[in-house]
Amino acid sequence: MTEQTDTSRGPEGQTCSSGGSSEIAHRLQDKMIETSLERIKHKLLVMSGKGGVGKSSIAANLAVALADAGERVGLMDVDLHGPSIPQILGLSGQLETKGKVAVPKPYSEKLGVVSIASLMPEGDDSATIWRGPLKIGVIRQFIADVKWDDLDFMVIDSPPGTGDEPLTVAQTIPDAYAIIVTTPQEVSLADVRRSINFCKQVDMKILGLIENMGPFACPHCGKEIALFKSGGGKRTADAMSVPFLGSIPFDPQMVVACDAGTPIVEQKGSTPISEAFEDVIKNIKNRVL
């Protein structure tokens, strides 16, 4: 990874080699990033204003659903401190390399995944303690030094909040769209409004808002249950003039599926949650295609 250094000059006014070589390396990486991104049609940054809203499970299931629909998909996990995508998808082992580039870990023929978890030894639970410049460098390498090839969609799972990771994606992938995940209750919606304002400040287009853990039908009596209230996502989207992509109902099987590494959208049979994901995918395609 390259790190930006101050350019200094010697007595004759020449640029010192360390600063000059660093600048050249940075420009070379910029070109590699540009070349890689040119082969990806649609980039979707999945973000949330706060943790605990199921953002990573939404990102993983969106990527799998798009791939199952025949799209060529890359899933890039830039949650560097708490990467969970490999576990949700049941992936293990480290990334392989081909020449000087890494190869995304295949989930299926149509879906490849890159995560910092796949660069660490199995069972390594040590904390990742990185400042901003290191995190920025890793995210840039995830694009420049990975063999993504031609993709219809890249889904990017970022950590909660509006810190270094989503900001780096916004600056490095200027044509990325934001998908904001929330739950219906007001404490989450206040954070969503901050995420929406973040996107506006960095000129990132917002594809829409997904409400997770929405109302569901009681399996015994069929009565609708709203554990986290209902309709808050749609109301916030309307109030902030942001498209509403759909509501994913709360389902205990989502927790079981994530722990088992078997995405819920691949479970057999039509269920309310699979139908909800189908509607969200349809709305995403309608807005980008």
Image (spheres, rainbow, N blue to C red):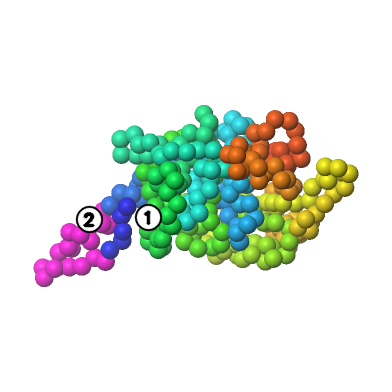
Where residue 266 sits: x, y (%)? 65, 33
Where residue 71 sits: x, y (%)? 57, 33
Three-letter amino acid code at the position of disc 1: Gly
- Give the quadrant of residue 14: bottom left
The residue depicted at 69 percent of the width and 65 percent of the height is: 187
Q: Is residue 289 above or below residue 177?
A: above
The residue depicted at 62 percent of the width and 47 percent of the height is: 58
Say which quadrant the C terminus sits in.
Answer: top right
SS label for mark 1 = helix
Q: Is residue 123 above or below residue 265?
A: below
Q: Which residues are magenta?
A: 6-24
Does residue 266 show up? Answer: yes
Q: Nearer the viewer, residue 236 or 87?
A: 87
Where residue 123 sits: x, y (%)? 44, 46
Please say whether residue 7 is one of the residues in the magenta stretch.
yes
The residue under label 2 is 21
Q: Report crowding for label 2: few under 14, some 14 to 19, many 20 or more residues within 10 A (C-alpha).
A: some
- Give the quadrant of residue 131: bottom left
SS label for mark 2 = helix
